[in-house]
Image: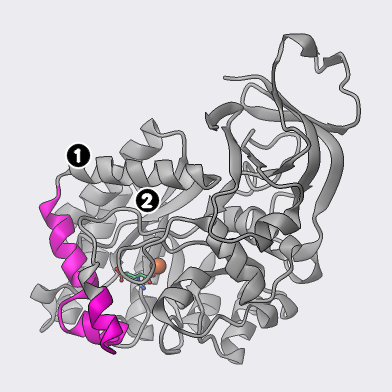
Amino acid sequence: MSNLIVTNIGMLATPQGKGPKKGPEQGDIKILNDAWVLIKDGVIAGVGQGKLPEQYDNLDLSTVKTVDAQGKLVTPGLVDAHTHLIFGGWRQNELGMKLHGKTYLEIQNAGGGIQSTTNATRQSTEEELTQKAARALNEMMGFGVTTCEAKSGYGLATEHELKALQVIKNLNDRHAMDIVATFMGAHLVPAEYKANRAEYIRLVCEEMMPKVKEQGIAKYCDVFCEADTFTKEESRQVLEAGLKYGLRPKIHADEIEAIGGSQLAGEIGAISAEHLIVCPPEGIASLAKGGVIACLLPATSFYLGAVFAPARDMVNAGVPVAMATDFNPGSCPCLNLQFVINLGCLKYKLTPEEVLTAVTLNAAAAIDMAEKVGSVEAGKQGDLVIWDAPDLDYICYRMGSNLTQTVIKKGTVVVG
Ligand code: NIG
Ligand code: FE
């Protein structure tokens, strides 16, 4: 495990604490100028300002590897709390359909969409999926992400859902990225069960979930609660079954139509509800009451040509807001969390401070990792980004460039 000091930090910008921030606290971050951060054995040992001490925590600092931040911005490593990382193929053919006016659900109902990615995923071996996802993880790290969530959900058959979760486990063991796995067998009713939805739900709950638990390969259970996909009651059934197998609920809610997903999230005590593009006021109230984190995915709104989630109303209602990419081959083929940062300011009208919390501490809390990551403080993992930027406003304002200069994971330079 590595010891490292980052010196000459022009601006250190970080939320603080081990849990999600809501309301006015979401924008209440710590800014330190002329700062340094010491990482010992992969964990942050100290954060200070001005001249470095010679000795810290029984460590002679002259012996520790130094990274000079050259007066630039440093933030916590970013956390991408919602990705559909594991899939075969791509769906560039759907772009033309979209341009000819077909909607997302029309493409899905015609056998495109999730079903076509499911066919490609079933045909891919564990090794092929591992190689492909590893390339995506490398790209994500290049954009400053040091922790992410990854879902299954393109297998939609026991063998293939378990295969996808095994790929996530392999990658978590081998890749520098920390990866948290979510089981999403209820992403779509696959073609072979279209005439018997109840049987597919039974399969998810009674065959897939016990195996997922037995193999210990997922922490969360997610469901696509959406028109033409899973109803509110089916979604409740899936999430309640997940709870029996120790899988905490997450839910794709109010992405295209509001059919009660956000209310269900609050009722069932989901750790997070995702998308919430068309979340109604009673949905926001339910999230606030249930202590659910809103995990917003603005790049998906952008890609679907949809409206943007009512983020400000959520902050005002005391719902902690996280933001993530939703990386997937259909509604958001984008791995760049920096673009999400731009959209958070420009479309949600969140402040740079609120946005930083959304992609670090609140995102970490949405995957129950806030004890370890999401802020630069003594005791947290040594995950940092040095940006080619003088301050926080700059990374929110610039667009289309990759502004990471150096990415540090557990005290080791992994990019730059
Ligand atoms: O979050 N909404 C469900 N799942 C993904 C899209 C999946 C796909 O189109 O392949 C999403 O948007
Ligand atoms: Fe998603």
Front one among 82 and 414: 414
Rate crowding at label 2 as few (under 14), some (14 to 19) or many (20 or more) other CA atoms within 10 Å: many
Q: Main secondary structure of the magenta part?
A: helix
Residue on which disc 1 sits? 127
Residue on which disc 2 sits? 218
Q: Is residue 171 left or right of residue 362?
A: left
Q: Residue 174 in the image: state x and y as whole percent.
A: 37, 31
Q: Quadrant of residue 167?
A: top left
Q: Inspect the magenta stretch and tell me whether residue 107 lies in it.
A: yes
Magenta highlight range: 95-124
Residue type at mark 1 is: Glu
Residue 263 seen in the current view = yes
Is the C terminus in the top left, top right, bottom left or bottom right quadrant? top right
Mark 2: which secondary structure? loop
Total of numbered circles in the picture? 2
Q: Is residue 137 above or below residue 324?
A: above
Q: Quadrant of residue 102?
A: bottom left
Rate crowding at label 1 as few (under 14), some (14 to 19) or many (20 or more) other CA atoms within 10 Å: few
